[in-house]
Every structure is written in structure tokens, then in C-alpha cells.
Image (cartoon, rainbow, N blue to C red):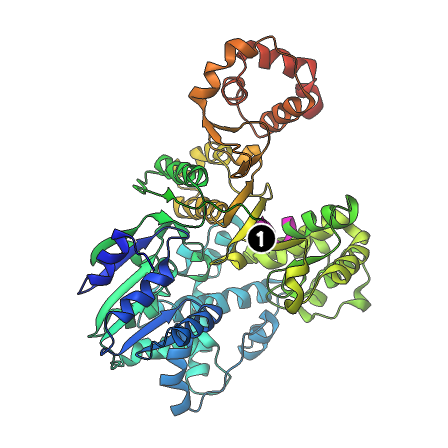
Amino acid sequence: MRLTEEQKEIIASEGNLKVNAVAGSGKTTTILEYAKRRPKNHILYLAFNKSVKTEADQKLSQQNISNVTVETAHSLAFKQIVPFSRYKIRFDYKPQEIAQILNIPPSPGDLSHLKLASHVLRFAKFFCNSPAVKVADLDYSTTIYQPESKAFVMTHYDQLLYYTRHLLAKMYKGEIDIIHDFYLKQFQLARINLSYDYILFDEGQDASPSMLEAFLQQKANKVIIGDEHQQIYSWRFATNALQQVDFTTRHLSNSFRFNHEVAHLATSVLDLKKQLGKAPNINIFGMGNHKDIHSRVTLARTNSALLSRAIELLIQQREISKIYFEGQLGSYTFSEEGGSVFDILNLYNGQRDKIRDPLIASVPDFEQLKNYTEETEDASLKSLVELVEKYHNDIPYFLKRIKESNVDDAHRDQAEMVFSTVHKSKGLEYDEVFLTNDFFSEQNLYDIKGAIKAKEVDPKTIEEELNLLYVAITRAKAKLHIPLKLLPTGFYVEGMKTIDNETKLNLRKREIAKKKKSTKSYVHWTKQEEAELTQLFLSGKTIKQIAGLLGRTSGAIQSRVEKLDLWDQYF
């Protein structure tokens, strides 16, 4: 295998090291070669999740590398803590269970006790993932971003702190089952010294702070590898270790997944961070030249947008017949706390006798459920509420058709389209990628500049929104279909909304478009150009910006906007 100079430099390096690796840059290959160079040393590879661990184990076995042990943070902590304790484990708790365990009294006429219980469980997870020794050392309100939720937390903060400490004490004493993050915390607090010569920490941009603390305590040579711009799990209290440790820095900047046009677009999206006072300072070189199309995926930011697109393609437009959802299909129709979209529909219709989930059953009406999702920042439940508001009683039929058309894992290669959120596609790649239009755009950034300046919006949340778009773009190997509204100012796609290696439909800078203005001033408008104009207009682009993107004069754009009655139709 031919290695790049960057890879060779990393493999030869000694001492503590951090590696900033862009998407598709051969990170796993570099890790394996690093281990091969040290056959007599005992090496621990901390993988991001179980699927990455399984894949790494297979590659190590295929290459006869026997000196590397692969663990996830949780599997490592489990082996060090749980077998020697009295703990019993459960996956998670529901708010009504927390309220019952802690005897949180219900409030007549509202859901305050369940909202409080939801925040208590979230606060407990925040502590378990933090490096803090005491719950009181943390300020939970810093993890809350929505105004309604923040107001609730600040009003009930003393109760919240009391109940969180009480819940964790019950877990510690073995009075109730522990959650998985709890033994991760116990591992960090135990300050266990691991007998490895090298520890490789993968996906360092989404590290659990408690696991990072345990990692940094080790005497072994330490290597953190990841992509600081792929941090998309701060809502799980992850931290960007690549920005926190003072290790020798190396880079993997050549992507073998996608071409230079996708690399250019990805860089331009990250450059938007400069408007947040950030300086990305990133180089991405697209070295890919893939042409064959075997896998196609639709990527969305949210579950509701993804299911909506599946309904459009499968049922309303009938463009596809076999589909596959990354992960289990049920994970898109059930909230993390267990309520299903059918329970929410029954609440919407007032059919309370058909509701199975205790949380949904305890909600007086649909409007109060919407209020609950706002004050608890329950994104998974909110996504299902949005589906019910959009499709109402058509949902059972739509989901029945989706289930009938969804192939199982063994036959995913038969699917004409894979559907996935960006979070579920992390670490994966596809030949052809279609993005939905629910991602954060440059226009959104302009719209909230005032709120950021007034400190009503945390810039970190916006930075992560841009990271989501970057991750989505960089899943593509051969073709990328992206809505025009998501393109940063200065880009347009010549001919169609596709970045395509086969037909060389390249992204062009605005300067190229400007050169064409004089020649297109009086050129006939095609239906496609009018559709693109409408989409750009609705996305909030100015007349001047649209002119640059479409290669027309501002006067021509203004005239066409008036001819199409866009102001009257949409405003």
C-alpha cells in the first residue's frame, strides 16, 4: 500500500500526538500502519462505537496484527468496573419512572413534574460524562439553548440539583439500576492505570469529557485522531479533544473519498465559521475519482425531514420501490423515551384510550405535548410531533407503505435508496448523496447574527450546525445533489444541482458567473432557471446575490421576479 507523506510522518512519530484528519483521508489505514510499526508494544485502540470496533477487529485479524486491543469507551469501562461491583444495568429511564423513583410531586394542571424528571436524567448524564467530581461543580444551565427550556431550568434549578444528586446516590448505593454512562463515570473517578504502551483515541472531536480525563491520566504514549469539524455530538455532552490537548499536531488533508469540487464546497461551508469569530484554517484536497454508482442515500438533518422525503419519493412521486433505513426503522418512528408517532397521532385525535406510552398518556392535549418538547429540548419527540402536524391521519398508511418497502440488513444492496440522518451516517460513505433542505444555511446565519451578538444564541450550536452540513457533504464519493439554498454565496452549479464526476458539472465561483452576465442579459429564461431563481429568492438571497449565482444582471433578476409575481405569491 502506498502511503502519503503525511501518513508516513504520523506513523514515524513518537510521543503524545494529535492528528486532524479530514473526511475520507485514510484514518483507519493510518492507525493500522501505526500499530504495525510497533509489533512489540501493547496498544489499545479506543473506537467510537461498537460498529467501528467490529470493523477494526476484522481488519486487524485480516492483517495478522495481534498486539492491538480494540475497545469502545463503554466496553473498556464496563470491564474495569461492573464485574467487581453489585451494579445492575438498564439502558435508560423514562421521565415518569424518574418522577416515581424520586417522589417528585405532580403539579395539578401541568407537566412540571415530568419536565423536571426529564431534566434530572439529562443532568445526571451531563455529570457522568463530565470530568467533575461533584454535581455541584457543574452548571447544567450552560447545556440548555432553547429560551423556553432555559427559563424552566432556571426557575427550578435548586430542585433540579437536589433531585439529580439524589438519583445518582441511589445508583451508587445499588438501590436502582445504573445507566451505561454511570459506570463510565466510575471508571474515570477510579483513576485506573491501564497497562498499555500506546493508547489511540479515535474520533477525538466527539470525546466524552470523562473518558478524555481518564485517557489523559494514563502513562502510555497517547494519540488522538479525528476531525475537529466533524463534532456533531455536543448534545450528548461530547467535547472536542482536538482543540483541548497540547500535543504535537499532525494532519491528514488528502481525501480519497471525493473529488476536488466537493473538497472546495466543504471548505467553503467551514469558512462560514469565520462569521462566528472562528478561523477554520483547514486544507482539504479531494483526490477521489469515483464514477460507479452502487449506493444512493438521502441524508437529512432531522428524522421528520427524512421521513417526509421518503414519503415523497416512495408514495407521492413513486420514483422508488425498495428502500433501506440506516439503523432500525423503528428508531425513526419512536422517540428516545419510547413514545411512538402513533401515540402522538392518537393524542392529536383525542383518542386517549389507544395511547400506549405512559408519558404521552399523561399529557392533557397535543398543545401541551408541544410545550413539553420545547421546555425539555426533546428533539426526538419534537420530530414526531412535526410529522403528525404535517401528515395527520395519513401517517398510518404512509408508514405501512414504508415498512413494506423497507428491506432488511441482509438485502440492503437491493435498496434503490438508503435513508439516513447525518448522525447515523457518521463514518459511512455512499456513491451518490442527496441532501434534504433542512440543514443550516448561510442565510440562516445572517438571520441570527443579531441574536448571537445579543448572546441569545450560543455560537457553538451554530458551529455544530455547519459541521452537520460538512459531514453530510463529505459522505459523497461520486455524486452530490445539494439544494441551491445550502450553497454558500459565490457558488452555483452549472446546469443542474449536482456535483458530478461523470459529467464534469463543476462548482464555479461567482467571478466565473459574472463573466457571463453580459452575454445572458437578454437570453431566454428556461423553466429550470426560473425554478432556480424561485428557490434562491425563497431562501432569502438578495437580488444582487442571485444575479451573481445565475450569471444575470440585477435588472434581469428584478424583472423576472416581478414577472413571476414572486413578491405577491410568497410574501
Q: Residue furthest left?
A: 15
Q: Is residue 561 left or right of residue 393?
A: left
Q: Nearer the viewer, residue 394 or 284?
A: 284
Q: Is residue 229 above or below residue 278?
A: below
Query: What is the quadrant of residue 196 in the picture?
Result: bottom left
Name the spot of residue 378 as percent of width and height, x first: 57, 58
Pick the residue in front: 343 or 317: 317
Q: Quadrant of residue 130?
A: bottom left
**Count of numbered circles on the image:** 1
Any part of residue 8 in sight: yes
Q: Residue drawn 74% across and 46% down?
A: 319
Which element carries disc 1, helix, strand or loop?
Answer: helix
Instruction: Assess whether residue 299 is covered by the magenta stretch.
Output: yes
Mark 1, residues whose alpha carbon is within 10 Å: few (<14), some, or many (≥20)? many
Magenta run includes residue 568? no
Q: Residue at x 67, y 50 (%)?
A: 386
Q: Which residues are magenta?
A: 293-305
Percent across and percent down for residue 183 are 41, 79
The residue shown at (68%, 67%) is 408
In which quadrant of the rendered image does the N terminus lie? bottom left
Q: Is residue 468 left or right of residue 203?
A: right
Which residue lies under the disc numbered 1? 374
Name the image quarter holding the C terminus.
top right
The image shows residue 397, relative to residue 473, as above or below, that is: below
Tell me which corner region of the image, top left, top right, bottom left or bottom right, holds residue 217.
bottom left
Q: Is residue 131 visible?
A: no
Q: Amino acid at mark 1?
A: Glu
Residue reaching furthest to the front:
1
Question: What x and y, as percent, mark residue 77?
Answer: 38, 79
Is residue 14 or residue 205 the one in the foreground? 14
| Along the line of sight, the residue nearer the viewer: 128 or 224 | 224
